[in-house]
Amino acid sequence: MENDVIIGRDDDKRNLINMLLDTTVEENVSIVTVFGIGGLGKTTLVQLVYNDGRIREEFPLKMWVCVSDDFNVKLLAAQILAVATNQAGPTDGLTMDQLQKKLRQVLERNKFLLVLDDVWNENYEELHNIKTLLAGGGIGSRVLVTSRSKKVTDVVGSCKTQELKGLSDDESLALFQKTALKPKDYPMKPQLAIIGKEIVRKCANVPLAIRVVSSLLRGQGESKWENLKDTDLTNLIQDEFNGIVPVLKIIYNYLPFHLKQCFSYCDVFPKDYKIVKMDLIHLWMAQGFIMPSNGESFEDAGKDYFKQLLQRCFFQDVDLAEGTLDEAISCKMHDLVHDLAKDVAGTEILSCNYWRQNNAEKTHHVFLDRSTSKGLFSDNLIEMKRTRTFLIDEGYLPCTLFVLDVVDLFEKISKMKCLRALSYNANYLVTRTLLSAIGKLLHLRYLELSHNQYLLVFPSSITNIYNLQTLKLYWCQKLERLPMKLGKLVNLRHLDIYGCSILICMAPDMNRMTYLHNLTGFVVGGTSNVWCSGSTGELVNLEIFSMHSEILEISVQEGVRYNAVEAREQGFQSKSQRLREIKYYWRDDNGSDESDNAEALLQSLQPNSYLRRLELWNYSGVRLLIWMMNLKSCLPNLVVIQIRGCRRLEHLPWMSQLHHLKILILNDLHGVEYKEGNIISGDEDEELVFFPSLENLKLWHVPNLKGWWKLELGKGETSRVEMLSYLRIQD
């Protein structure tokens, strides 16, 4: 999305790449800095450079760390280590010397590029310590620093520096036009061009200011343009600290009330935090911010709110759903936009790195991060009587923080009677007994306990939370049972149990949950010693529960029996265009006698043709039936296919003609000898192009593989995978 509105930075990009590739620099690890006032696009420019093909080839190891306000050398070292190893393991128990040793082992003789984005700290000693940490990298390694402060450039000891300035007048007007006008309105009318030039002049050629202001005018008439032209935008402050916040605040004032409260709520997340769109919408719902109209659902209204804020450029760094051009799944906020959210939110919203003791009673929304002190729990949580949001994320906490305080924490949380949203997304000691206290929070509408590896059985007291709308238990891999009376949660709309790989069965009375239309996991069949049967695990219920699901994992319990007749009568065929990812997972491979049963069951689980990602795990069938063998017509939009652990499978679907397929993973397939049967014939001397979009191919443990096609290519025929950039083959 954003690449469409990057204008006027070609020379800056070329100069920065030349600085990074300069072979005349004598130091093993040298520093390049980019500085300029906020809103000029420093991070965007560096992202363009970071993803450039020449940079990818030159630097085998690339790392990106957002620094922002909290400059802590030890924490920064841990972040660099996590990015370099692609592992977010615990580092809080390590001393600084141990961290430095580990980091040097990773970086030793590796030519790397490290981006330290948005550095504010101007302390020479601390910046010098970072440079010392990185010593030992391969010859030609670079550290690329972005900052609003020129002093950082001087203190850090840059070998090369690039000052980023505003766009030219013509570039500014081009950016304004591209953002303010819809394609059908091109070219800009002469009168609007005159007004546009005046508005752009007041934006001082700062790209972020131009984008935000022009987005407000998109689709509006001339009177709205005139009104904005007469608004005092000249408060734009040209220094590295205040940037364009005054202009952003003026634009914020144009938002309708419902968008203002949704935007200011986003301050609860730390800077550079990846905000998942649907999580944000569910949190908005929990706070009562979403007011549907004309019969639309809360979720659809929330998506419209998100889209409006995105169109007004309050969100950026958008991740798109696989195979789509405009379906956002997550985003971030520009630092200056985050500063605006903090400004308008006032004292109601606090990430704890902004914690002030005298704000405890006024605090409505809290996010705990690494700078939180243990004293917070014992001294201040008891004062948070009006708290409505309490978010805890493992990625933003030291692992030692809650081991000692978790009992005290949940005791105090249970007394927050106004609490509407609670997220404890952390792999720390949370037991059934501790969670029982949550059942006292009768106003709770959003509850997340994802990634908890100590939760075996969900406490029945949770079913007292009558108003609960969202329950997220994502990747709770030890969870065996949901509450028997889960059906009491009649207002539940979203149940996320994706990755709960040993869940015995669905709750027996889930049919009472008439609002439940977004389910991410479903156990077919299954019984337990507690319940008479898992009757809700029949396929006839799956289509109802997953009507609005975007991601779905279907887990087949041991001993499930389906024949062809039952498959036709009780089968699931999703008609929803929302479903974009599906995973089929057989719990146990019970031998060849289960082959026909597995084939009949898979035949009855056909997804919709809009599907983007397909995974098949531990399937015990020998063959795939009609809809899966004919992917080109049944599932033509697939972007990712992953087939794992299907050891009896002898025939794979024809995949090479899928136009959108980018990732193909085949693992542990002992019965496969050829990937595809026959070759689509071509003319003599014609090159056969197959997998037109495939970028990533992994073949692991396919021991009997003889070739791609059973028949050889004809005389003069050749084939190639044009877009392939990653290939891994492993016995």
Image (cartoon, rainbow, N blue to C red):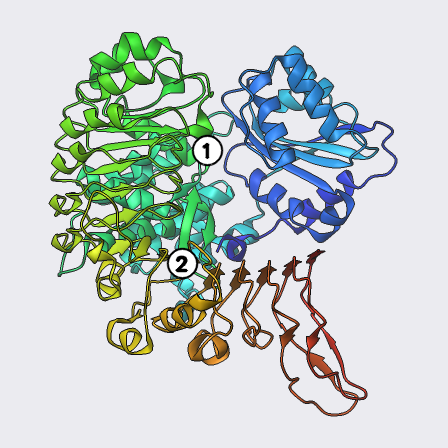
Task: Tell me what residue is drawn at x 11 percent, y 39 percent.
Answer: 466
**Residue 400 position within the rendered picture, expressed as x and y whole percent measured from the top left:** 45, 16
Q: Looking at the image, which is closer to me, 402 or 13? A: 402
- The quadrant holding residue 662 is bottom right
**Residue 357 position within the rendered picture, expressed as x and y whole percent measured from the top left:** 30, 10
**Amino acid type assigned to the residue bearing label 1 in the image:** Asp
Residue 319's label in the rendered image is none
- The quadrant holding residue 664 is bottom right
| Residue at the bottom extreme, as displayed | 683
- Indicate the secondary structure of the residue bearing disc 2: loop
Name the residue carrying label 2.
Answer: 327
- The quadrant holding residue 219 is bottom left
Q: From where the camera sits, is residue 504 visible?
A: yes
Residue 335's label in the rendered image is 1
Q: From where the camera sits, is residue 235 visible?
A: no
**Amino acid type assigned to the residue bearing label 2 in the image:** Glu
**Residue 74 position within the rendered picture, expressed as x and y whole percent measured from the top left:** 59, 17
